[in-house]
Image (cartoon, grey):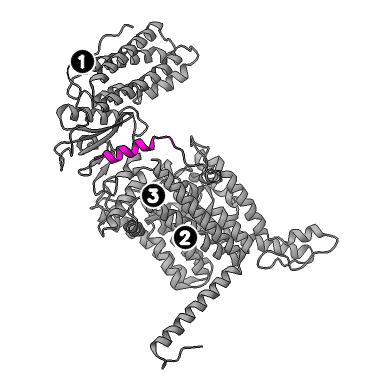
Amino acid sequence: MPADPSAPPAEAGSAGAHRGASALAARARAVAADPGLLVVLAAVAVLALAYAVWSWQRHRWYLTAGYDLGIFDEAAWHLARLEAPASSLREVPNLWGDHFHPIIVLWGMARAVWPSPVALLVVQALVVAAALVPLYLFARPRIGAPAAVLLALTFGTSWGVQRAIDFDVHEVAFGPVLLFAAVLAADRRRWGWYWVATLGLLCVKEDVALIVAAVGAWLLLDGRRRAGAATLLLGLAWFAAATRWWIPELADGREFSYWSYHRFGDDLPAALGHVALHPWSPVTVALDASVKRETLVLTLVAFCVVVPWLSRMAVIAIPAIAARFLSDSEVYWGNTYHYSLMTFAALAVAAVGGLQTLDRLWDARAAASGPAVDPGPGGAASAAGPARRPLAARLRAVRAATAVAAVGLVLGTASWFVVFGSHGNVGEPPLWSMAHFEPPPRNVDRELLDRVVAAVPRSGSIAAPPPLQPHLTGRGQAVNVLASRLRGETLHARTADNVVLDLAGTDAFEGGPGDLLAALAAVRERLASGDLVPVAMPGQGWVVLRDPRAPGGTGRPAADAPLRGAPARGLRAAADRWTASVRTLLGPCAAAACDPRQRELVAAATARLRRAVERAATVAGPGCAGLLRDASATTGETVGRLLGHAADPAAATPRLALGAALGAGMLDAVDRATVACTAGIAPPAPPPVVR
């Protein structure tokens, strides 16, 4: 009953509140009356919790990295302060000059409330899980509630989603929920909400605009010409504006650098023209490599391969497929990282149309073969078949969409284990591990790395290995990689105010062996000249070095003064002799002609090195003593492996692999350990080695 306009304000407000409560109660009754929606909401809660906990545990155990969590955390930190989204890791003053993704403002808002990189991880888990609701609501009237539930679960548990969750954060996490909301609003002709969702989808990333254009093409094919044409033109115009004007403007004139489809043309119009003249070329290119074919099959198997292509909605999936498999860049072809998330989302939308087509074909066949069975909107039969054919009647009572969606869910689940076991990947699918209450891999000493992070001074720029980078962002300090983002640029290890190194190992270093050696050489030079001094040696080869001229100075005296005099010179001489003897042994062993005398020389050099380490450790400070002993243990393990291979005349191939590993940096473990403990001591000339 409408409120009386002449009623006092308090009474009018009470009537409005009553209407709001009634509407809310009506919606609650509608949700309770839909068992499928209740199942989906329960799945959203479970998946959101699982994905959030998994992401948090990965970060807590130093499995996240600067690329990409550190980059986005830096941008969110600035956005939370109403500043441009800069990133020192990406080396850009405005991240929107790299990719145009205004949607990350939401991460800035989250970080303003929760000042931690974990805020980004949790938001990603929530929005990815929440996408199941609009997908279900879009699919339900078309294919029935049971099939819609199965399809939503197929997407929410797919390996594409799990890969994205298992790789830091990325802006495309916002894409699925906005895509599903847009097609749902269009299907219900709620055009106001449709344009809100579409504009949000455009803000996810510049190339998602092509999926928006594909949604417009679907609307055109579906007869909704005005909305379809407007969406198609808006998507194409947004992509052109973002790549030709907005990104270069925000990047100080630097051109958009992510176009990787040069076999078709140098830009989108040229590529579309090429495809118009050579319509089979996209198919040829998409299948020209085995890794592409494997990834494509693993992607489509969750939708029974052909289902997404059985209706006009298939046009929505085409840009997502093309972006992956027509690219010149091999990183897009495999099943790693976050690149499959939007592909699975677009295929899920297309699969709704394909399942609807199968339902119609099934109903037509059933009508032609005998008494019809009306499956009803929920998939339950409303009429029974002939008494002499009870099995046929029961089969007809199940929608084709429900049966095919169930098969897709089973195949999609099976594909988890293929994906997470391929291309050298290790570990189990996150959902499988969580179901067994198993955490992500715990391969590091977390407490040690916590001490390393805490020891980094809170002023000046930082150069650090990838696992530490997202734990150092958010301080207001520039965080960089140790080497350089682009080849030929100045190493950050040479210029940063604070340098964090794992001197006893290479597992935490980005780049290749050359980058590692160059960074270590730069650090050695700075130590020798006094441009760096050690401020902390938390253990196991980790050192924190600082430029004493940095803002705020060293903050406190060096934890361990460098070794001087005879202990330092003896240590360097022993380390050089050991290095030379091991390098000499590698040559003939790689040719399967190991000389027993060389093995004896290595053993003797190793014993001498251990004695030198012990002597130096007795006069060194506690940090250097621990560092040297850790390096000595690493050296002993390395030599044991090398001599074991050298003694086996049939192990030429393993020896070559070991030689590559040693050349990558393990060979110089002791030398790296002495960098911080013998600063200023020039290494003597290596002694001759008997061959």
- Identify the mark nearer the N-term, 2 or 1: 2
SS label for mark 3: loop
Indicate the quadrant where residue 638 lies: top left
Is 277 rendered above or below residue 421? below
Q: Are marks 3 and 2 in contact (CB under 8 Å)?
A: no
Q: CA distance from mark 1 to mark 3?
A: 57 Å
Is 222 rendered above or below residue 467? below
Location of residue 674 in the rendering, given as x and y in whole percent from the top left corner: 25, 23
Residue 375 seen in this snapshot? yes
Q: Residue furthest right?
A: 388
Q: Quickly name the residue at label 2.
A: 177
- Identify the mark nearer the N-term, 3 or 2: 2
Give the magenta part as a residue range: 442-456
Indicate the quadrant where residue 330 lies: top left
Q: CA distance from mark 3 to mark 2?
A: 32 Å
Q: CA distance from mark 2 to mark 1?
A: 64 Å
Q: Are marks 2 and 1 in contact (CB under 8 Å)?
A: no
- Residue at 66%, 62% (x, y): give it: 359
Which label is found at residue 265?
3
Q: Quickly name the residue at label 1.
A: 684
* Amino acid type at mark 1: Pro
* Amino acid type at mark 2: Val
Q: Nearer the viewer, residue 258 or 158?
A: 158
- Identify the mark nearer the N-term, 1 or 3: 3
